[in-house]
Amino acid sequence: MIRAVAAVGVVLAVVACVPDRSPEIVSARLSYGGGDQAALYFVAQGSDDRLLEVIVGEAAGEFHRTETDADGRTTMQPLTDPPRLTTRSPLVFEPGGLHVMVVGLDPATFSPGEVVDVTFVWERSGRQRLRIPVVDPSAALGGPDG
Ligand SMILES: [Cu+2]
């Protein structure tokens, strides 16, 4: 098992090997607080493409948008179209906005501090495999320790 200290370096090393025209994935992390669900956050930039699918381990994720209504209730809505990025406009999945919802995870194989295989499937660039760190939900929010 690879600990959190090494995880950031792993992600950066993988990004450096991606061909020029593929989207560059930065600041990717899987927020996991136990159970069989997790949320993936990331920023993709530097390409014109659409994200068709994200697979975490063996599980296919769903693209969700977090929305807060007038009464302050927060809900998640599935996206109806594949999310798109352009060279001028990065694709940002962050807490409170877009996330990849992953369900059906085996809790025995996920815990904060480890890394997980994630496959991004792009319309133009094809499949892109990364090793992404698993973080506690509090760290995923991007606080001082995140
Ligand atoms: Cu969701």
Image: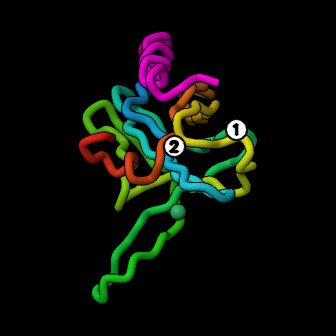
Count of labels in the image: 2
Q: CA distance from mark 2 to mark 1?
A: 11 Å
> Does label 1 point to a residue whose CB lies under 8 Å from ligand 1?
no
Identify the magenta region.
1-21
Q: Residue at x 40, y 32 (%)?
A: 48
Task: Say if 123 sits above or below 141 in the image.
Answer: above
Q: Position of residue 123 (x, y in %)?
A: 57, 36
Q: Nearer the viewer, residue 95 or 127?
A: 95
- Give the colouring mode of the picture: rainbow
The answer to whether residue 145 of the structure is visible from this angle is yes
The label number, if any, that marks residue 57 in the structure image: 1
Q: Position of residue 87 (x, y in %)?
A: 31, 30
Asked where in the image residue 95 lies, by quadrant, the reply is: bottom left
Task: Say if 46 sits above or below 61 in the image.
Answer: above
Q: Residue at x 50, y 61 (%)?
A: 64
Asked where in the image residue 67 lies, by quadrant, the reply is: bottom left
The answer to whether 17 appears left or right of 109 in the picture is left
Tell me the element at label 1.
loop
Question: What's the residue type where badge 2 is placed?
Answer: Leu
Q: Based on the picture, tell me whether residue 8 belongs to the magenta stretch.
A: yes
Q: Position of residue 1 (x, y in %)?
A: 64, 24
Question: What's the residue type where badge 1 is placed?
Answer: Gly
* Residue neighbourhood size for the residue with mark 2, other residues' Cα within 10 Å, grouped as few (<14), some (14–19), many (≥20): many
The answer to whether 121 appears left or right of 93 in the picture is right
Q: Which residue is identified by label 2?
A: 30
The answer to whether residue 22 of the structure is visible from this angle is no
Q: Residue at x 38, y 30 (%)?
A: 26
Whether tag 2 and tag 1 are in contact, CB under 8 A, the answer is no
Q: Residue furthest bottom?
A: 71
